[in-house]
Amino acid sequence: MADVFIAAPATDEARARGLAEALVALGFDAAASTPGETEIGPLIETAKCVVALWTGAEPPTWMAVLATMALQQNKLVCAATRAEVIPAPFRAAPAIDLAPRDRTAFKVKFTALLAAIDKLAPTEGKAEALPDALIKARAALLARPPSPPRRVLQSVAVFTAGVAMLFALGYGAGRVMQAVRSGEFLVTTTQAEAAPTSAPLEAPQALPISWSELEQQHNWRVAAQKLSDDDRIKRRAASGDARAQALACLGHLAGAEGFLPSPTAAREYCDQSAEQNEAAGLYLSWVLQRSAPHAGIDAITARERLAQAARLGWLPAQLDYAELLSERRAMDSQAEAGRYFLAAAERGDARGQFLYARWLRDSPAGPRDAAAALPYLERAAEGDQVDALHLLATLFRDGRDVARDPARARALYERAARQNYPPSMFNLADLLRSGSPPERARAVQLYQALVCLRDEQQIQPMAERRLRALRESAVCR
């Protein structure tokens, strides 16, 4: 049996075979087929990597069983024509959005898929075959069948969650398939994560901050402002509700209204939430360790919890963990970082788009392709992400990777400066200081603001020198 097995519904069998052929051309031992019941066990034991191809078509029983077994053994990689069609129970696995329409984007994503597969099933690789492999893979995925109705997508989530539940209860592949066919299980779930919490969750609106809002808020101090002296959090946390425990951890960490500022209390709640595999509790454990190292969570435990939260798909955790990985020299760490950056970018997160653009330009595991990075950088700038605004402005100022455009550079620097981003404030002031009287006055205003930022060890003294050269001074309150 092959090292890499491509699993797909019958309607997508041709696409799976085309993807397998592309992998074979690159040197991987890959195959795609429809296994029988007795073949699933040996297949999962032999394969080093299972690639589940999700297109929105309803998966057959064997595919759900195989994907569940592969996820349990950390052998699963998800490839999807649209990110949202991956069933919720499998989103903890590495996931690559292989939408084939944009040729340039597809090259980047296909390379990310290769990196994810190579991590599980290493191969010498045939770099010279990459152009042909790209053509084969993209052609296969472009020949897609009609999209299924939305109700099928909803049933897939329940179906696969049920399969995962049966495996958690110790069923084997054969028994699971029999249970599915006989209608033995009826499963409902309120969580997207595969691991259930020990207490039933109330409706999301019962909490003072929605879970999606908490996940999309990168600044935990801002998120904590949403909390209040609300007995619902404390009551539910005491009853074992993992999400309420995560919010209680945040409340004590930030000293929110009604919560005593106590790193120790925060740790206790984070520990309780993390024990139930709640992504927010796992991530906040990492935040707590960095903000209050004396709280009692050691650095190794904090990093492990951060990694688990990233695997569960918690957006801030994916980005923080990817940044940690990108600091390592190992190519597999660099490649994994790129996968997490891409996952965040594809969800529309501006910070993720900036970090993925930087990875595409600079990472030794990436293509180092400025043209591929530019669209993500533009999207992040559209979201007013200050790092993206600053970098894009600098590119237009210097004419690097784009045509030189001083006016656009100034406009982008201005948008970041209005968010009090010191590097953009300084660069904008440098562009304006030799201009008209109003421009010179704006430059002086920016330099004065920078001089009063005492924690800016590099920019503050440079701004001070600029003011002296302009025969101006600053009065800091």
Image (tube, rainbow, N blue to C red):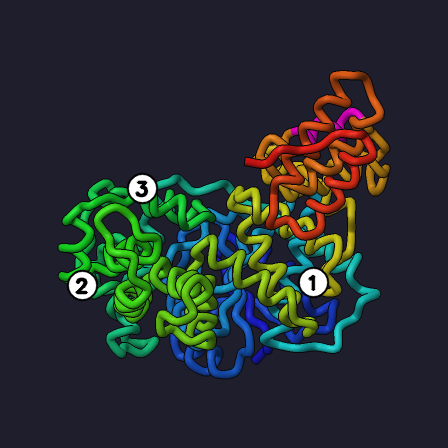
The amino acid sitting under disc 1 is Ala
Q: Which residue lies furthest to the top in this view?
A: 437
Q: Residue 423's x, y, as percent?
A: 69, 42
* Region rendered in magenta: 407-414
Residue under the image location 31 percent in, 60 percent down: 161
Q: Is disc 1 surrounded by few (<14), some (14 to 19) or many (20+) residues within 10 Å?
A: many
Mark before the other along the chain sequence, 1 or 2: 1
The residue labelled by disc 2 is 240
Q: Which of 279 and 186 is in front in this view?
A: 279
| Mark 1 or 2: the one toward you | 2
Query: How far apart, in angstroms, are the residues tagged by discs 2 and 3?
Result: 22 Å
- Circle number at residue 306: none
Secondary structure that dominates the magenta span: helix
Q: Does residue 172 sit above or below 101 in this rendering?
A: below
Residue at 67 percent across and 37 percent down: it is 389
- Indicate left or right for 317 with 464 as reference: left
Q: Along the line of sight, which residue is nearer the eye, 86 or 225?
A: 225
Give the CA distance from mark 1 to mark 2. 49 Å
Position of 396 relative to 200 (above/below): above
Give how far across and how far down residue 477 sits, in percent.
54, 36
What residue is pinned by disc 3?
226
User: Which image quarter holds the N terminus?
Assistant: bottom right
Tell me which amino acid carries mark 2. Answer: Gly
